[in-house]
Image (spheres, coloured by chain):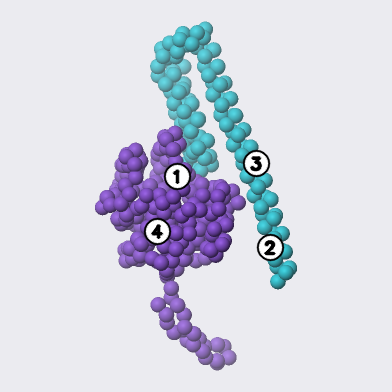
Amino acid sequence: MSLRLTVSLYVLVALLLIYLIIMMRSKKADIRYILPWLLLDLVLFLAVTFPDMVGEICAFLGIQTASNMVFFFGILFLLCIVFSLTLTVSKLNNEIKNLAQRIALDKTEKAGRDKES
Amino acid sequence: MIFRHDIEFDDGRRTTEMKEDRVRKLAIIPAYNEEENIINIVDEIRRQAPEFDFVVINDHSRDNTLALCREHFINVIDLPINLGIGGAVQTGYKYALMNGYDYAVQLDGDGQHDPVCLKAMLDTITAENADMVIGSRFIEKKGFQTSATRRFGIRFFTFLIKILTGRIITDPTSGYRMVNKDIIEKFASDYPRDYPEPESVVSVLKNGRKVIEIPVEMRERQGGVSSINIKRSMYYMIKVTIAMIMERIRR
């Protein structure tokens, strides 16, 4: 890898880390959901620092080129994150539905009791 | 303390009333599936520390916890969804704030926290004018000392807190803690959702507040099942460590 590419990638890793920390610090994002992105940043850092390791994993898995491997694992990783978010959204949606129903029922029950007294 | 309060109305009428200058204290009891323990705990509090009000936070239990509380006319807040220990306890702090309590203490619904220590905690927090008093298992090392793996994790958090705040807290994961009005207000608006104890201690310490530990003896969980396991523990260790660092570099 050229020196220019290496330095740019390190800058990218650093900026991503700073951005993630700012998001966690200001509580704009839940640490729970930031963790996969921190992991991604770590993997990126390792790949830039040990480029030979990338080549070896490539050969071991029987993948033709490093860029193919990066795309493959990158997409796989993003798919996992997206799917886990899908599950989270479904769960949240259900909880909101339950809360809405509960509030409405409580209001009705209270109105009924107030009427009686 | 009861004292006389003399009142004079605008029209010249005078009267006297007896007012009680009571320090109001609340025990917050988070409970998830604690049908085996909850009645016993409440009875113990009524016996050992009758001057404490208490409220059970039913974290959407799947068992009979809520029904038992209602049958025995126990003051209970029924959460419509399961929030976890952080959300449940924070509900208690919101309740404490709403009702103007001076001190709030967290007391787990599984029987590990002995209500006999409540008086000592209250005496400490008032005498020392502290913001938070934590009941630590590891000062005198008496009573239930929890598993070796957990103790290792706890020592790690003690070490981390020392680095982040300079303070030594021997039992940072102890849920047995009493706080004053300032911290009630703080926790009511800002409290972590899962594994909240170490992170909240850092949050209190970083603002230079007074945190004191006193020795307590904890008991083994009296009945029911704990909600922690190995895989979750690993995830929590990482998550809580990051959260504690974030908390330190915030505001």
Q: Position of residue A104 (x, y in %)?
A: 70, 54
Residue B107, image quadrant: bottom left
Q: Are marks 3 and 4 in contact (CB under 8 Å)?
A: no
Q: Residue at x 52, y 65 (%)?
A: B99
- Check residue B226 in the rendering and tell me which mark sits there, or answer none: 1
Label 1 lies in what chain? B
Q: Is residue B216 above or below residue A92?
A: below
Specify whether disc 2 shares its chain with disc 3. Answer: yes
Tell which tag, 3 or 1, sits nearer the viewer.
1
Q: Secondary structure at mark 2?
A: helix
Label 2 lies in what chain? A
Label 4 lies in what chain? B
Q: CA distance from mark 2 to mark 4?
A: 34 Å
B87 left or right of B107 in image: right
User: What shade does chain A have?
Assistant: cyan
Q: Are marks 4 and 1 in contact (CB under 8 Å)?
A: no
Q: Nearer the viewer, residue B204 or B91?
A: B91
Disc 1 residue crowd, few under 14, some 14–19, many 20+, Cα 10 Å: few
Find disc 2 in the rendering and name its residue. A110
Q: Is residue B149 above or below residue B33?
A: above
B36 left or right of B66 in image: left
Q: Are marks 2 and 3 in contact (CB under 8 Å)?
A: no
Q: Is residue A72 above or below residue B45?
A: above
Label 3 lies in what chain? A
Amino acid under disc 1: Ser
Q: Tally the marks.
A: 4
Amino acid under disc 4: Met
Q: Are marks 2 and 4 in contact (CB under 8 Å)?
A: no
Q: Residue at x 53, y 41 (%)?
A: A28
Amino acid under disc 2: Lys
Tell which tag, 4 or 1, sits nearer the viewer.
1
